[in-house]
Image: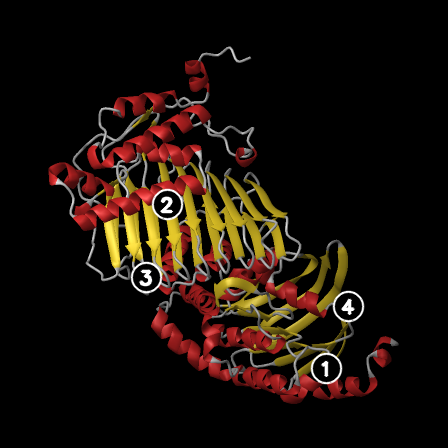
Amino acid sequence: MNLETPVEQMEKKGLASMVAAYEALSSARAGGEFSWLDDMKDEAFRHWKAEGLPTRGLERWKYTSLEALNGAVVELPDKREIGEITNPFATARFTAEIVFVDGVFHPAASRLPAVEGIRYAFLSELIDRSRKGGLASDQHELVVTMRGFFEKGETHSRSVFASLNTSFLQDALLLQVDAGKTFKDPILVRHVTGGAAKRESGFSVSSPRVLISVGRSSEFAIVEAFNSESEARWFVNSVTDILLGDAARVSYCRVQLENEDSLHIGTTRIHHSRNSYSESAQFTFGARLSREDLLIRLDAEGAEAKLSGFYFARGQQHVDNYTLVDHEVPYTTSDQIYKGILDGESRAVFNGHVRIHRNAQKSHAAQVNKNLMLSRKAEVDTRPELEIDADDVKASHGATIGQLDPEHVYYLQSRAIPKHEAVKMLARGFAQEIAFGLQNEAIRAFMSGIVAERLNGMEVGHE
Amino acid sequence: MGNLLEIKNLHASVEGKAVLKGINLEVKAGEVHAIMGPNGSGKSTLSKVIAGHPGYEVTEGSILYEINFQMKDLLALSPDERAKEGVFLAFQYPVEIPGVSNFEFLRAAFNSVCKHHGTPEMDEPSFREFLRKKMEIVNMKEDFIERAVNTGFSGGEKKRNEILQMAVLSPRLAVLDETDSGLDIDALRVVADGVNRLRSKDNAIILITHYQRLLDYIAPDYVHVLAGGRIIETGDKTLALKLEERGYDWLLQN
């Protein structure tokens, strides 16, 4: 029998400050046409309040402690004047650039040209308009789409962090691509945190939410980039849902470059349809602690998912990638490769879980995780997991953890390249396999640039 | 003219096992020396020691190398410092480096040498132009530039890549470690032509080989026979022909 009071349980689970923050919010409800959203937030609140923070007793959180969040004071960002937002990226090749600051759309820093076949909608703007005099019928339609999307996310999978995101989100982006359109040039969504909010302990919370719908037989490419404008401590809890129509194709890339005091939790859910294709890539460089969940359901025949990732951790950083691919029907394919470089006293976790359900005959699944250790004090826990209930499938998985091959270092040295440069070049080569493997050409150029810059900036010299 | 390289009483071991047991060799600029010998005689070890491989320990003797008209202790220099001073080793088994393009690799190598000598480094477009000309020497296809270093290369391509690197770095002392092994006759000709085009009165080449065949294309000034960690015979190119005909046994029996 549990003798703890609910409040004590809550404190133990570390979310007391969140509960207080949510209760304080209840005055600021959207209401009116958006009362479904209020209900959804409440429902999500009940879910995460009952569940509490995941602990290391859970299989999926075995190697990652959320101690930093446990009992931490958590606040929602103040309404504040936002100054100039800098752009650290080379964005010339992006069709559009959508900037969110602390989880809220920031039109002044965004570039949103009208593109036939792509619709953008922002939850905050829609709520605002509906209050100021009602929505036009096409806007109303977008609200319905958005709502459907939120509900779809709930049925795909539920998690404490996705629920926290739903409860605390202040805005959401809906990107809708019409059927039969091909867009090779990507759209960039930048999630910037920082600005004036500065605290000694605890976190400010940002809850970015992105909903992407790619219509039948369309092709679309998108990058979500997360970075900090200051050294302020943020807890960024992002959720992205991608919905693919029949034979739709998406190239989706996330790059996380937040400051090394921050905590980053990302959840990406990809919903496939028949013969649809997703290419998703996760690049992690920033945050003190980061956890990315990539959840893919292949529940329509011919659906194919390619997953790739690269993480670079140093100092005290902790990076955790969890991927779940569910092959639920026959003729589905998944292929994943994650690579990581660890330096300093950093830790990395890779847990890739592939489930081939009983019915999913003729499915193919491949998974590999490779780690390069630059320091003796770094640590990696890798768990490629394959669960197969069908008998006529092709599946493989594997993991490696190793150091730089001294013969490689020597080969470069024998070509006049000093040792520290040789180490950097080899580390870069190890990483670039992921960036060079990206299929969208503009994203490939963008990401290989970031990888090169990040790895060139590293300090070498640890033995 | 003075010596470019002076090896005196060189003893070296690998993993505690003595391989070189008193090598003496002098090389002048403009000369081509062939070193032949049975398997396990220490040929590759000698090349690795000259190029500074960290797995080989020199236990006795010295290697002097001319830098700015002075004989300097080559063993005191790190592998990259040796390369900057013009020492080059063409590997018997070139290493595959996925993810690093040939272009990036060659430009970094070239600019590292430039930087060392205080000459201006080359930007991307000019290096591309420079590289194209060098690629003609070894008959390399255009797509080679963007391919990862040696990754997925055939044996012949790897060897040609070694000669290309030699062309890019213009070493003063090039040691070619069994560059002919594993090559068919056409590839051998390409590699040998490349080496001949790079041969000049200012540089020296040490050819390590099992076979006389390479020496049909690259005529050596001297042929040395290495056996049991020592040079047991030195002659001109006719010695190689004799070895081809009679093997090593007649020498080893002495």
**B207 left or right of A243?**
right
Q: Are marks 1 and 3 in contact (CB under 8 Å)?
A: no
Closer to viewer: mark 2 or mark 3: 3
Mark 2: which secondary structure?
strand
Q: Which of marks 2 and 4 is in front?
A: 2
Q: Give the residue drawn at x 61%, y 52%.
A: A397
The residue to which callout 3 is attached is A179
Q: Name the residue under label 1.
A: B211
**Subunit that carries the residue with mark 3:** A
Of badges 1 and 3, the one in the foreground is: 3
Drawn side of residue B32 relative to residue B10, left or right: left
> Badge 4: few (under 14), some or many (20 or more) residues near its Cα, within 10 Å?
few
Secondary structure category for the residue under label 3: loop
Q: Are marks 2 and 3 on the same chain?
A: yes
Q: Mark 4 lies on which chain?
A: B
Nearer the observer, B145 or B121? B145
**Percent coordinates x, y for residue A132 in the rendering:** 11, 38
First in residue order: circle 2 vs circle 3: 3
Q: Residues within 10 Å of mark 1 (few under 14, many from 20)?
A: some
Residue farthest top in this picture: A3
Q: Do labels 4 and 1 share a chain?
A: yes
Label 2 to label 4, Cα distance in Å? 61 Å
Q: Position of residue A240 (x, y in %)?
A: 37, 45
Camera-nearest residue between B55 and A332: A332
Which residue reaches farthest left? A133
Q: Name the residue under label 2.
A: A240
State which chain disc 2 sits on. Answer: A
In the picture, measured across the screen, residue A428 lies left or right of residue B90, that is left
| Residue ID at (64%, 64%) | B48
Residue type at the position of mark 4: Gly
Mark 3 belongs to which amino acid? Ala
Q: What residue type is labelled 2?
A: Thr
